[in-house]
């Protein structure tokens, strides 16, 4: 009968959060965990930690809604017993979140102004439990040694913990000795058990080296697998920034746990979309800090996953400029990390870019700085021609529907590679500033393709015509110093920039803006005249922020090119001056 | 020095108040933080001066005076000694937690779990207990995984700590009697846990970091052990054979002492006609003839050079017993034939 009592009393509660069967289940669990000390019960505690935290949170909410301890005890008579049992379960008290919630629950039972004997007794009990937990020890031998050697318990336990961690670390590091025989015992058996035991320790700084070894041990045999609960616990501790993991451990976590990798990539994307004002330098720093490029360079499989995420984001929003910037910056960070590792790893480019058109791979991945400046134009013309051929081949047979998805796929992959290697698009725009009318065709095509990869309604031709028109205007502004400004030309440029009719295929405003800014920066036109043109067009089209963004993206590239320092200085000064003008026009 | 003595006296008073006075009711986080700062200060004082007999004596005298006046003020006051200073924070904590007048707000600070457990909060009292509980619990969680080894991780850690204390004592005081006294008091303190203490000693003797101080400390410990006959015998019967042979391999002194204990055990044996077996005559040692043989064989395996010397010695003893080759007449003769089976 007495067993049923809590059940009946629970039923009278208005709070539907705590289900009776569930509560009984937990009470039974707590009893079972306390009774047996077998590896099975230990594992069971670890596996239930997550749900236990939720329960403690619910209990806490429940207690906060009641007015006094006596009332709580009436509605939850088992609570004291339950919490008391948990206090002596090391798996629960080792886990930072469970421990915090458990103590909060105890405080929930504590009465600041006890009104009766029951409440006074509860207070005494809570104080006693806490005192015992912090100062008493069931290991009498250790206590005697500590006392007589004059060692503070805090120091002793810290040392003991480090020792245990070191011993286990050594054990895990031992090589597998089963020789593939599945029936033979081997040291790998302990890996699963150890990873399970580490579930409550994911936020414990002293356990970090052991966690690192667990994650970084090479897959030795089939039994050397890690507990999923461990990986999940680690992943959530990492994302809530509670863990103290080393760089290499984080990378290994991503390698083992897809969802934590996904989360890390998505948080970068989210950041770049929400913080539009971020400069390219900041973005690069931020990416380096994220460790993602490093992780990608170390593990081909991580890179493929990251790229898959980028790919699917691009498919949903091909024109989102910050995302394209992120992908481009990410790729250059990745390539840098890869170059650092080159003598250690021997992953082929084909393995890293399996879906990209192989003929374009090396030419696009080559950095402009790795090539003499005089060769840029020829290189770009070749790239443009190759891409043009590829799109014509793939888009040409669009009328027969069979295999058209596959062809779209090929064009998309070529474009995706171009986005990743966006540095060549930047060079193309810059070269367009000094191009003559007869040789700007291929470069304009490349630029148009970059901004309009999907040839919807077969409009690329028309977009190309408009891009050409814009270039003609800019060419005449900046090369033929015409004073005063030809108002009609200016007007048509503005209208090209601000055209929003979807039926009228006009080139992306960003394409034209990019051209405009590059002309303003790189042309030989006087600074004051350039400023005047830029400001007039930007003011009238209302694209001040976008222009500022393009301007700041030119800055970091100055340092990597093979530009002479004089030239570099001149360009740098022009960028700063133009930036100041834009700031003041806001 | 005067100022240090005054601070020591104040901290002793602070401990008494924390443990026994209702004044803690007025404490807040700042008071608590300051109290722990003073306790830490005393730990520093201990570490700085415990090897310095002259200073130590002066401080002990000061503490005696303070104890006297505190005894008058607080009935049932527990005195504080100089060596207690090494764990002053712990004593403060125990005192506070057992004081029924301690406000719950202070308890909450001590048992709080700061979400961000970064190292910078080292000086902060917030979560002081929570951190201890975490470490203790984590040790327990990992303990079943470490597997069975001859020496437990706990004994190993305690062995290292023992070496550190010995090293520090020997490097400064120069007076062997003080160090001996320290070991005696540890031994006495571990009376109920003699088996565990044997493990700690073994772990201490097996620590591998070889500095001059460490070697001196191990040497001192070996000498001390040799003079404690019953302790040495207990150690030889309690520890695992592999551990004993490891010790014999590492320390010549221990090898000789171990050999001596084995020979003593042999000489203490009498032939029981009823059992047809050699048995121990002394009351407290329960080593069988078979076990004794195993000890010898393990020792020979670990130190092959020892075999010839010991066998020569046993042979001489056998001859002095009459050199009969009949079983049950000379324990030395029977041991020799058991060893050469």
Image (tube, coloured by chain):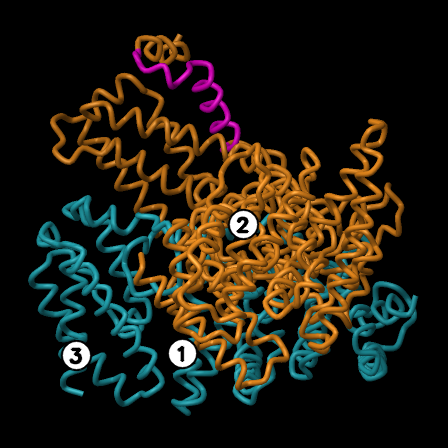
Chain colours: A orange, B cyan
Residue A339 at what x, y percent from top left? 71, 70
Q: Residue under circle 2?
A: A321
Q: Secondary structure at mark 2?
A: helix
Q: Give the prevailing secondary structure in the magenta stretch.
A: helix
Report the mark closest to the observer, 2 or 3: 2
Report the mark closest to the observer, 1 or 2: 2
Q: Residues within 10 Å of mark 2 (few under 14, many from 20)?
A: some
- Letter of the chain that mark 2 sits on in the rendering: A
Q: Residues within 10 Å of mark 3 (few under 14, many from 20)?
A: some
- In space, the residues marked 2 and 3 are separated at their CA atoms by 76 Å
Residue A145 at what x, y percent from top left? 44, 64
Picture layout, residue A79 above or below residue A320: above
Q: Nearer the viewer, residue B155 or A302?
A: A302
Q: Residue under circle 1?
A: B181
Q: Which residues are magenta?
A: A13-34
At a point 16% along the width and 61% down the height, the residue shown is: B16
């Amino acid at each position: 009968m007495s067993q049923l009592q809590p059940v009946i009393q629970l039923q009278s509660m208005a709070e539907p959060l705590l289900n009776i069967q569930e509560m009984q289940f937990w009470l039974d669990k707590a009893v079972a965990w306390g009774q047996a000390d077998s590896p099975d019960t230990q594992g069971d505690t670890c596996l239930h930690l997550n749900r236990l935290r939720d329960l403690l949170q619910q209990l806490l909410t429940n207690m906060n809604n009641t007015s006094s301890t006596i009332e709580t005890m009436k509605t939850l008579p088992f609570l004291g017993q339950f919490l008391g049992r948990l206090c002596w379960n090391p798996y629960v008290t080792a886990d930072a979140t469970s421990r915090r919630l458990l103590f909060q629950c105890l405080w929930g039972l504590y009465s600041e102004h006890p009104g009766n004997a029951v409440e006074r007794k509860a207070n005494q009990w809570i104080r006693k439990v806490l005192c015992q937990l912090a100062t008493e020890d069931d290991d009498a031998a250790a206590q005697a040694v500590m006392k007589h050697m004059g060692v503070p318990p805090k120091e002793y336990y810290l040392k003991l913990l480090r020792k245990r961690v070191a011993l286990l670390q050594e054990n895990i590091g031992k090589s597998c000795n089963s020789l593939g025989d599945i029936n033979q015992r081997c040291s790998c058996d302990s890996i699963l058990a150890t990873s399970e035991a580490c579930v409550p320790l994911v936020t414990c700084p002293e356990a970090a080296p052991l966690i690192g070894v667990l994650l970084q041990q090479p897959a030795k045999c089939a039994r050397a697998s890690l507990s999923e609960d461990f990986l999940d616990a680690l992943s959530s501790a990492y994302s809530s920034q509670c863990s103290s993991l080393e760089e290499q451990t984080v990378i290994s976590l991503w390698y083992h746990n897809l969802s934590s990798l996904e989360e890390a990539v998505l948080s970068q994307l989210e950041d770049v979309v929400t913080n539009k004002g971020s400069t390219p330098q900041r973005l690069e720093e931020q990416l380096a800090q994220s460790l993602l490029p490093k992780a990608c360079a170390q593990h081909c499989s991580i890179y493929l996953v990251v790229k898959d995420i980028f790919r699917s984001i691009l498919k949903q929003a091909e024109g989102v400029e910050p995302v394209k910037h992120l992908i481009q910056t990410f790729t250059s960070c990745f390539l840098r990390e890869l170059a650092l590792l080159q003598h250690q790893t021997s992953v082929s480019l084909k393995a890293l870019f399996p879906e990209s058109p192989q003929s374009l791979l090396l030419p696009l991945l080559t950095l402009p700085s790795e090539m003499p400046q005089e060769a840029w134009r020829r290189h770009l013309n070749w790239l443009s021609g190759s891409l043009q051929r590829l799109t014509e081949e793939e888009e040409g047979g669009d009328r027969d529907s069979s295999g058209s998805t596959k062809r779209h796929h090929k064009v998309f992959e070529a474009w995706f590679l171009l986005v990743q290697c966006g540095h060549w698009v930047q060079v193309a725009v810059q070269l367009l500033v000094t191009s003559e009318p007869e040789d700007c065709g291929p470069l304009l095509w490349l630029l148009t393709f970059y901004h309009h990869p999907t040839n919807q309604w077969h409009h690329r031709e028309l977009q190309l015509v408009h891009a050409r028109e814009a270039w003609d205007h800019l060419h005449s502004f900046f090369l033929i110093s015409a004073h005063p400004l030809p108002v009609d030309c200016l007007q048509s440029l503005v209208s090209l920039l601000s055209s929003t009719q979807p039926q009228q295929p006009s080139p992306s405003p960003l394409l034209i803006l990019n051209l405009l800014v590059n002309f303003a920066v790189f042309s030989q036109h006087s600074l004051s005249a350039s400023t005047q043109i830029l400001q007039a067009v930007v003011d009238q089209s209302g694209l001040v922020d976008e222009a500022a963004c393009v301007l700041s993206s030119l800055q970091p590239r100055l340092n990597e090119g093979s530009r002479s320092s004089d030239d570099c200085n001149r360009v740098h000064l022009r960028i700063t001056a133009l930036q100041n003008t834009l700031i003041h026009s806001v | 020095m005067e100022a240090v003595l005054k601070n020591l006296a104040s901290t002793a008073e602070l401990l008494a108040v924390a443990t026994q006075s209702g004044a803690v009711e007025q404490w807040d986080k700042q008071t608590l933080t300051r109290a722990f700062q003073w306790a830490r200060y005393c730990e520093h004082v201990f570490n700085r001066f415990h090897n310095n007999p002259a200073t130590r004596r002066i401080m002990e005298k000061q503490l005696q005076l303070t104890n006297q006046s505190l005894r008058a003020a607080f009935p049932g006051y527990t005195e504080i000694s100089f060596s207690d200073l090494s764990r002053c924070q712990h004593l403060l904590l125990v005192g506070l937690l057992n004081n029924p007048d301690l406000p719950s707000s202070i308890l909450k600070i001590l048992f709080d779990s700061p979400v961000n457990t970064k190292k910078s909060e080292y000086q902060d009292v917030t979560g002081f207990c929570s951190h201890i509980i975490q470490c203790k619990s984590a040790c327990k969680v990992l303990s079943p995984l470490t597997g069975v080894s001859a020496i437990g991780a706990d004994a190993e850690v305690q062995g290292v700590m023992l070496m550190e204390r010995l090293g520090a004592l020997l490097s400064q005081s120069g007076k062997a009697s003080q160090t001996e006294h320290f070991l005696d008091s540890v031994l006495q303190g571990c009376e109920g846990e003699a088996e565990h203490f044997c493990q700690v000693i073994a772990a201490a003797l097996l620590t591998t970091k070889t500095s001059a101080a460490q070697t001196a400390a191990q040497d001192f410990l070996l000498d001390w052990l040799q003079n404690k006959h019953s302790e040495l015998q207990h150690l030889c019967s309690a520890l695992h054979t592999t551990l004993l042979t490891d010790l014999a391999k590492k320390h010549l002194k221990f090898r000789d002492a171990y050999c001596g204990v084995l020979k003593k055990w042999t000489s203490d044996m009498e032939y029981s006609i009823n059992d047809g077996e050699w048995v121990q005559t002394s009351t407290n040692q329960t080593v069988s003839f078979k076990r004794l043989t195993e000890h010898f064989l393990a020792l020979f395996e670990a130190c092959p050079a020892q075999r010839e010397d010991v066998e020569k010695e046993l042979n001489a003893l056998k001859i002095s017993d009459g050199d009969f080759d009949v079983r049950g007449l000379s324990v030395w003769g029977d041991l020799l034939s058991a060893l050469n089976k």
